[in-house]
Image (cartoon, helix red, strand yellow):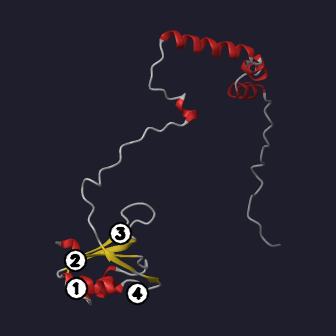
């Protein structure tokens, strides 16, 4: 059985690479399987997760390697324990629990209200809006009475006076600055 030969090595220093860890665990015996896990996505993508699984070919080698527990590797003391598989029945995802938050329970009801209650709710909302200050619903008169900006610009453009053009003397010589 592989479970009695498989070890979990945790609390690994992030600077330890796969090769260094493999050389460390090979000292205790022949390795059947070695897995150093890495982050697949997110901001830590490509970086080690901080633990590995090692399966030895013999149980005696795994027992010897378990002696590495609490050994300083890098800047951290590693943790070495037996790796136990979780049965598939235990790995089922938990069923979604009903979330019952009082503030949201009124907004998201599963029960459909009948047409009469919907009409009453709309009428109550309309009465509430009538009671509120009517100025909130008025459109700002100064803005509504003015012409649109583009129209104002076009009117100003046609009414502007033209500035007189300054004529150049064709005989005047325009040369760059030079010393006298």
Alpha carbon separation for disc pair 3 and 2? 22 Å
| Inter-mark Cα distance, 2 to 4 | 20 Å
Query: Secondary structure under badge 2?
Result: loop
Question: Residue 72 is drawn in which quadrant?
Answer: bottom left
Q: Secondary structure at mark 3?
A: strand
**SS for dot 4:** loop
Q: Is residue 15 above or below residue 144?
A: below
Depth check, mark 3 against mark 2: the one in front is: 2
Label 1 – label 3 distance at C-alpha: 26 Å
* 159 in relation to 130, above or below: below
Residue bearing mark 4: 71
Residue 117 percent coordinates (x, y)? 53, 12
| Distance CA(mark 3)–CA(mark 4) | 22 Å
- For marks 1 and 3, the one nearer the N-term is 3
Name the front one of labels 1 and 3: 1
**Is 9 displayed left or right of 122 in the figure?**
left
**Dot 4, crowdedness within 10 Å: few (<14), some or many (≥20)?**
few
Q: Quadrant of the C terminus?
A: bottom right
Sequence order check, earlier mark of 2 and 1: 2
Question: For the residues marked 1 and 4, what is the alpha-carbon distance in whole angstroms?
Answer: 17 Å
Q: CA distance from mark 2 to mark 1?
A: 8 Å
Which residue position holds label 2? 5
Say whether marks 3 and 2 touch (CB < 8 Å): no
- Callout 2 crowding tier (Cα within 10 Å): few <14, some 14–19, many ≥20: many
Find disc 1 in the rendering and name its residue: 61
User: Disc 3 designates what residue?
Assistant: 38
Q: Are marks 2 and 1 in contact (CB under 8 Å)?
A: yes
Residue at left offset 72%, top offset 19%: 137
Quadrant in the picture for the N terminus: bottom left
Label whose residue precedes the other's in the sequence (3 or 4): 3
Q: Earlier in the sequence, mark 3 or mark 2?
A: 2
Horizontal placement of 179 versus 69: left or right? right
């Amino acid at each position: 059985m592989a479970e009695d030969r498989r070890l979990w090595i945790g609390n690994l220093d992030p600077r330890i690479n796969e090769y260094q860890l493999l050389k460390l665990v090979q000292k205790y015996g022949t390795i059947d399987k070695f897995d150093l896990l890495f982050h697949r996505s997110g901001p830590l993508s490509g970086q080690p997760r901080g633990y590995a699984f090692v399966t030895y070919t013999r149980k005696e080698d795994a027992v010897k390697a378990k002696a590495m527990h609490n050994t300083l590797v890098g800047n951290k003391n590693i943790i070495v324990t037996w790796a136990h598989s979780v049965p598939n029945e235990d790995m089922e995802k938990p069923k979604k629990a009903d979330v019952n938050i009082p503030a949201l329970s009124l907004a998201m009801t599963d029960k459909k209200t009948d047409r009469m209650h919907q009409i009453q709710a709309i009428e109550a909302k309309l009465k509430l809006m009538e009671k509120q200050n009517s100025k909130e619903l008025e459109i700002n008169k100064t803005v509504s009475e003015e012409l649109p900006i583009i129209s104002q610009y076009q009117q100003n453009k046609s009414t502007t006076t033209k500035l007189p053009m300054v004529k150049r003397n064709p005989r005047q010589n325009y040369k760059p600055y030079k010393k006298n």
